[in-house]
Image: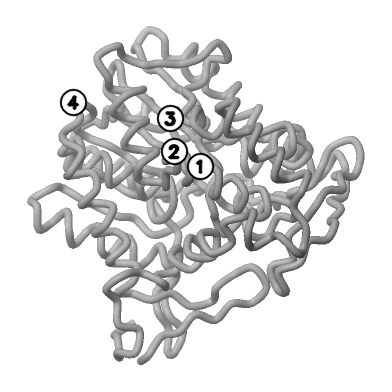
Amino acid sequence: MIVEPKVKGFICTTAHPVGCQKNVERQIAYVKEQGTINGAKKVLVIGASTGYGLASRITAAFGMNAATIGVYFDKPASGKRTATPGFYNTKAFDEEAQKTGLYTRSFNGDAFSADMKSQVIDCIKKDLGKVDLVVYSLASPRRTTPDGTTYVSTLKTVGEPFTQKNWNLRDNTINEATISCANEEEIAATVKVMGGEDWMDWIQALVDADVLEDHAKTLAYSYIGPVLTYPIYHEGTIGQAKKHLTESAKVITDAYKEKGIEAYVSVNKALVTQASAAIPVVPLYLSVLYKVMKEKNLHEGCIEQMYRLYKDRVYGADGIISENDGMIHVDDYEMQEDVQKEVMDIWKRIDSDNLLQLADTEGYWDDFYQMFGFRVADVDYTKDVMV
């Protein structure tokens, strides 16, 4: 069938298998061009099919020559409905890894479940013995805990509503958007879904099963951003969850000190994701940030970020490089003083009349569509493809 993008609201409901494959191949080629990282050799990536999780797995496999196990949750094609992009991404990754002779196993299912943890542990025991790096990169709107309770996350403020400039993606105008406050139940549920509880559960399960190497490392990902977006991220419901994630890293490190296991949170750069596209205010900040960072030759996508993270900050000659807050920061380019000053200067001036001149709206949409395999170079979208 011929696959075209179908955007509903802030989500694309189709994915292009060839475009997704090309995206994976491009990221693999980038890592190979950069050179080898003297890092982990047996890697588990939880949340491995898109974004930073996929880029982490590619960096481990093709940058460290590591055996990798990936856990993801994506839907295969059904009738005229395409698979989700992560399904195609994982298929492409597995094929490329196998061509290179790299060990790869991918598990499609609920990473929060005890059953998935058991399946992965059995695989590690049988095929790898133990793993020496665990990457926790789950991004899910809901979580069902082992007791059967389902929690749903919300992207709201804490304390009071937040009103700020907003880019109306449908008609390219600038208006104002207000994000409402969360109640205590919503805050607690968001922490349950997006905090560090399941990360700790995974590490506990791996240690109990004796499939985690002594001196292994484990990383989870976060975002802080500028003061402008603090009410949404740093101080909002998602910020409360990320604070719990940071606290969880300390708990993991302290709990397994005798085994030398170290847990860190890496604070990464703002990028277009399926989640960020749906959050008011954020797409406008991203499009302005992209313009400024591209002009300064500082812009990085997921793969550039993850390669730099593992080569320079995790497995570099100086070992782990963390800041005073205990976290690893590869948001350093985004948060440079000159970058943020220019972003804020533009923010004050931007309106419906100058939006296309002051913001990289085209770059934003390119990233959005490329997540689903569209707008990818060297893909003929007029051709029939197997979905």
Q: Amino acid at mark 1?
A: Met
Mark 4 or mark 1, which is nearer the start of the sequence? 4
Q: Which residue is mark 4?
A: 38
Q: Which residue is mark 2?
A: 298
Q: Earlier in the sequence, mark 2 or mark 4?
A: 4
Quadrant position of residue 121: top left
Q: Is residue 20 left or right of residue 109?
A: left
Coordinates of residue 81 in the picture (x, y in percent): 46, 84
Q: What amino acid is at disc 4? A: Asn
Q: Residue at x 44, y 51 (%)?
A: 51
Residue placed under numbered mark 3 in the picture? 219
Q: Earlier in the sequence, mark 2 or mark 3?
A: 3
> Mark 3 or mark 1: which comes first in sequence?
3
Q: Is residue 194 above or below residue 19?
A: above
Can residue 122 be seen in this snapshot?
yes
Which residue is at 85% across, 45% downward?
A: 182
Marks 2 and 1, how far apart at CA: 5 Å
Q: Determine which residue is flagged by label 1.
A: 293
Q: Secondary structure at mark 3?
A: strand
Q: Earlier in the sequence, mark 4 or mark 3?
A: 4
Q: CA distance from mark 3 to mark 1?
A: 26 Å
Where the N terminus falls, by quadrant?
bottom left
- How has the structure been colored for display? one colour
Marks 1 & 4, CB-CB < 8 Å contact: no
Amino acid type, residue under disc 3 in the picture: Leu
Tell me the distance, in whole angstroms, between the alpha carbons under discs 1 and 4: 29 Å
